């Protein structure tokens, strides 16, 4: 939603200061991990899939804005569309999982870093012409 809202000139709402932390994982890496668990995992075992890539929500939005500034530049930075809104009651400050089991069994399952994953997404599946997603 952040990308589409940014391209459409809409506000990019951030809860509180945006300092909630999440573990980000590129979609292809997540799909690869799911496939690996189905094919090679042991029945009855639990596998937490994580990216070992914790980022604050605001940092992710800033990264997206910076990439859009490079790929689909406009007069003002996309960062200017960021608006801070009241945080949700009970909003978790951090989601964390222990993904060491899957990392130990299948090293290298997550290959893309956040910025590289966004760039790949744009180049491969989201062509843009004249500021419009095709």
Image (tube, helix red, strand yellow):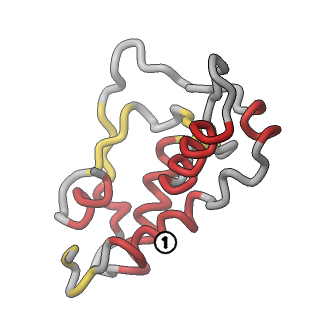
Horizontal arrangement in the rendering, residue 67 relative to residue 52 (left or right): left
Please identify the residue farthest to the bottom as the structure is shown.
130
Q: Residue at x 51, y 49 (%)?
A: 31
Horizontal arrangement in the rendering, residue 3 relative to residue 24 (left or right): left
State the image coordinates of residue 40 (x, y, percent, origin top left). Answer: 68, 39
Please tell me which residue lies in front, 26 or 39. Answer: 39
Neighbours of disc 1 within 10 Å: few (<14), some (14-19), many (20+): some
> Disc 1 on helix, strand or loop?
helix
State the image coordinates of residue 88 (x, y, percent, origin top left). Answer: 34, 21
Please tell me which residue lies in front, 22 or 87. Answer: 22
Q: Residue at x 43, y 80 (%)?
A: 70
Please identify the residue farthest to the right as the structure is shown.
104
- State the image quarter where residue 44 is shown: top right
Q: Which residue is mark 1?
A: 119
Above-or-below relation of 93 to 79 = above
Q: Residue at x 53, y 54 (%)?
A: 26
State the image coordinates of residue 111 (x, y, percent, origin top left). Answer: 67, 59
- State the image quarter where residue 7 is shown: bottom left
Horizontal arrangement in the rendering, residue 38 relative to residue 45 (left or right): left
Please tell me which residue lies in front, 36 or 58. Answer: 36
Task: Report how many numbered discs are placed on residues in the image.
Answer: 1
Quarter of the figure with the C terminus: bottom left
Q: Residue at x 36, y 40 (%)?
A: 14
- State the image quarter where residue 74 is shown: bottom left
Please tell me which residue lies in front, 103 or 87. Answer: 103
Above-or-below relation of 100 to 28 = above
């Amino acid at each position: 939603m952040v990308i589409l809202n940014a391209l459409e000139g809409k506000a990019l709402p951030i809860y509180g200061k945006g300092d909630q932390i999440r573990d980000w994982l590129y979609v292809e890496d997540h799909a690869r991990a799911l496939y690996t668990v189905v094919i090679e995992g042991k029945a009855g075992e639990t596998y937490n899939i994580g990216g070992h890539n914790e980022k604050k929500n605001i940092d992710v939005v800033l990264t997206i804005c910076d990439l859009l500034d490079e790929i689909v530049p406009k007069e003002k930075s996309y960062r200017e569309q960021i608006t801070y809104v009241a945080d949700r009651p009970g909003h978790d400050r951090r989601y964390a999982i222990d993904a060491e089991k899957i990392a130990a069994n299948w090293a290298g399952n997550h290959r893309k870093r956040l910025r590289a994953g966004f760039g790949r997404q744009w180049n491969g599946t989201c062509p843009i012409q004249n500021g419009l997603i095709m």
